[in-house]
Amino acid sequence: MKMWDGRFAKPSAKLMEQFNNSLPIDKALIEEDIAGSIAWAGALKKAKVLSVKEHILIVNGLKKIQSEYEKGSTRFISSDEDIHMAVERLLVEKIGKAGEKLHTGRSRNDQVVTDTRLYAMRRMAQVRVKILSIQKALLGRAQSDLKIIAPAFTHLQQAQPIILSHYWLSLLFALEREKTRFSNATDTADIMPLGSGAVAGAGFAIDRNYLAEELGFSKISENSIDGVSSRDFIVEALSACCSTGILLSRYAEDLIIWSSKEFGFVELDDAWSTGSSMMPQKKNPDSLELIRGKTGRFIGNFTRFATTLKGVGLAYYKDLQEDKEPLIDSFDQLSLVCEVFANVIATLSVKADAIAKDLDPLLLATDVADYLVEKGMPFRAAHKVVGKIVGHCIEKKLALSELAVTDLKPFSDLFEKDILKVFKWESAIAHRNVQGGTGLNSVKNQIEKARILIKE
């Protein structure tokens, strides 16, 4: 027997029951469903719908259901369409008719969106902590790699020299924006819809401000139709998961390339690598490849639900049952991705000798152009002059740093002996002490700002 079957002359088809059932997915919301039900029972007592005795019975029964679930002894049955029906059935079995009063004035429409908002807020707080763990690992790398000068790449071509710490910090600060996205999505979710009923509002004198306070919401929904139909908070949460996944995937791509024999800049710890079933020599960066691969999953979950939502009218339609699976999956997978990425960063080995060996003196070409600018030449003219010098080096198979002043004079009379200082990596780094640049003082300032961010 179902809670709603009074209007029907015959039972649902077995296939329809299976098709309609969401319990395997939404049982993840049991903690939120019980919390919402306890708060609702309190509101019903305040509205004099429940007696003090009935209220105590219901609250104790709900707490026992929670305890049993945590112990793994909860028994679900086929007629439990969703977690709401399951909790109500279990409550009635435990305390009798008093349990049948709990749903007074409440609809599964406002109940499910309340549960999902609470769940999303809880999981987004957890994700922010996971992102923070990556930032801590990156800060550790930035502090330890201050003396390593590495090539920065554009178009996968060596571009300019940087302090390796500067690279690690680029991800740390980018992740701070990802945390902000989850904060913004949390603000969107932080609106309590309970009391909206099925569509028109509860038919009893429910104190919704009391409910919001009990459940930890800072605001209540101002319109019952909006209250039960809104899923923008899920779209925003999925978007935040998607954005974070894309960001980590981009850095995973760099590290996959850097860990190859051709680069050899880093080596992943054995604990975060895998081997080949056929080739004994292989050490594969599968942790990073899976991080890159799972980003497609985050994008898919976002697209999947956004596509579902675009055709759903107001207020509630069963299509909205499809909101929880992509949300839960994205939170679960992003939590894993963040944990793995933090461990990869914290344990990988940086091969400073290989990086130093790979530094191409042509990385200093921009510094040579800047030198000419400081001597009074317009930048566009300096760019052209240095371009010709680079072409000469490539043709003659010479390193830029091997050129003497006499070699440079034919390209411009502005070259003097002080150009030789430009051919030092430390000099190039020192010329980039602009705020946010790769100069040593700038990077140290970034590290200090990163420490403050992490403490906050």
Image: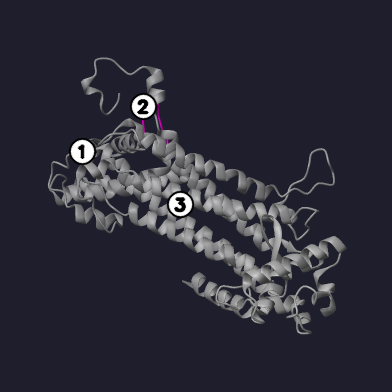
> Which one is closest to the eye, mark 2 or mark 1?
1
Q: Determine whether the residue tagged by mark 3 lies in a helix, strand or loop.
A: helix
- Left or right position of 115 against 315: right
Q: Residue visible at 72% across and 50% down?
A: 273
Near-viewer residue (70 or 13): 13
* Helix, strand or loop: magenta stretch: loop
Q: Nearer the viewer, residue 356 or 428?
A: 428
Indicate whether residue 77 is drawn in magenta.
Answer: yes
User: Earlier along the polypeptide chain: callout 3 or callout 2?
Assistant: 2
Going by the numbered disc 2, the residue's amino acid type is Ser
- For label 2, the SS is loop
Residue at 72 percent across and 53 percent down: it is: 257
**Alpha carbon distance from label 3 to label 2:** 35 Å
Q: Quadrant of residue 451?
A: bottom right
User: Mark 1 belongs to which amino acid?
Assistant: Val
The residue range painted magenta reads 75-82
Residue labelled with disc 1: 199
Q: Please say whether residue 31 is visible from this viewpoint.
A: no
Crowding around mark 3 (Cα neighbors within 10 Å: few <14, some 14 to 19, many 20+) is: many
Mark 1 lies on a secondary structure that is loop
- Residue topped by disc 3: 240
Residue bearing the label numbered 2: 79
